[in-house]
Image (tube, rainbow, N blue to C red):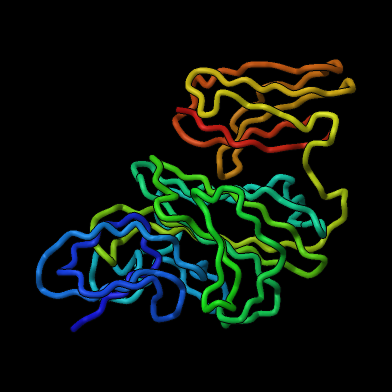
Amino acid sequence: MKTKTLLFSSLLAIPVVALLTSSTTDASGVGNKEIAVSKTTLNLVVDTNGKLSNTGAPGEFTCSQATCHGAGNGTSSTGGLPDNGGSGSIVLAAVPAFTGNHYVAGTTYSISITVSQHGINHFGFSFEALDNSGNTNPSVNNAVGTVTITDPIHTRKGQPFGTGRMCVTHQNNGGASSNAAVFNFNWTAPATGTVNLYYDGIAANGDKLPDAADNVYAQTLQLSPGSTTDIVGLNSHNSSIEVFPNPSTDMFTVRFTTEAASNVEMQLYSLDGKSIKTLTNKKVNAGVFKESFSTEGLVRGFYLLRINTGGITQTHQVFVN
């Protein structure tokens, strides 16, 4: 009897034959479904949690490997579509920002990972923050910093093999969204040492094949220790920025309070960091700042709104319908 192991499956419908056995741990102990099949046809919808340790870090694959989301339309060949070969992207944004690719020891960063591809409705991701030791054994935990799950509906964390690298990935059905999905969590930086961030995302086409030829987007970012001058966020004078409605259709409004007169500059960027336009750049008095901006000319999707006030910068995500 042949056993098929489904790896980083994300909201795929797999045509299988009568279900005989099912478990929540695969051969490597990473918490995925293992299914034995016979010859009776049945359609099983698999919308599993994300696979831990599948970020492309040393000793790991990405999701484009065979029997996962790759291997060319269900063939048994090794490897899938080239990573980053599709029309979409994966983008990591942090608040405070990693200025100059530096982190500040003990600082908690709000991380947002956006996986996007037009026409896709199912997304997933994996993320790891690892030291610079070069360890290639995923069962040995060389993760650094502390991960806190802030959105348990869409994200979770775990360690493969029980002792392996701490990894953040999507929850069951956590990436069901049209054209793009955003996954949020916090990461508190370690005391010292070079940090390597590995993150990859999957845009699943839902074609019911275990080797689905889905597009995978994988990126890395190396961070080095910095000083408190590298913290880019909002200070206590204007820490409560509101952007609403979000998602927006015709207009969105930005509102915050500042205790001192300062210059306010707002710029809109695409997810790949390209500047789209400057919304405002002017001196404002102390008090409540409130201004609305038109979304005319913007295509549907996610944008980064960068707000600088008094030399301090914060980035917000805005979705335009």
Q: Is residue 43 above or below residue 166?
A: above
User: Which x, y percent locates residue 61?
Assistant: 47, 73
Q: Name the residue at 45% across, 29% down.
A: 299
Q: Is residue 227 above or below residue 35?
A: above
Q: Indicate left or right for 222 with 42 as reference.
A: right
Q: Name the residue at 87% across, 55% down.
A: 227
Q: Name the residue at 77% across, 64% down.
A: 190
Residue pushed farthest left?
A: 40
Q: Indicate left or right for 321 with 266 as reference.
A: left
Report the front residue among 266 and 39.
39
Q: Indicate left or right for 43 with 281 as reference.
A: left
Q: Is residue 140 above or below residue 254?
A: below
Report the front residue among 281 and 308.
308
Report the front residue among 291 and 77.
291
**Quarter of the figure with residue 177:** top left
Q: Quick check: can you spot residue 199?
A: no
**Quarter of the figure with residue 315:** top right
Q: Quick check: can you spot residue 284?
A: yes
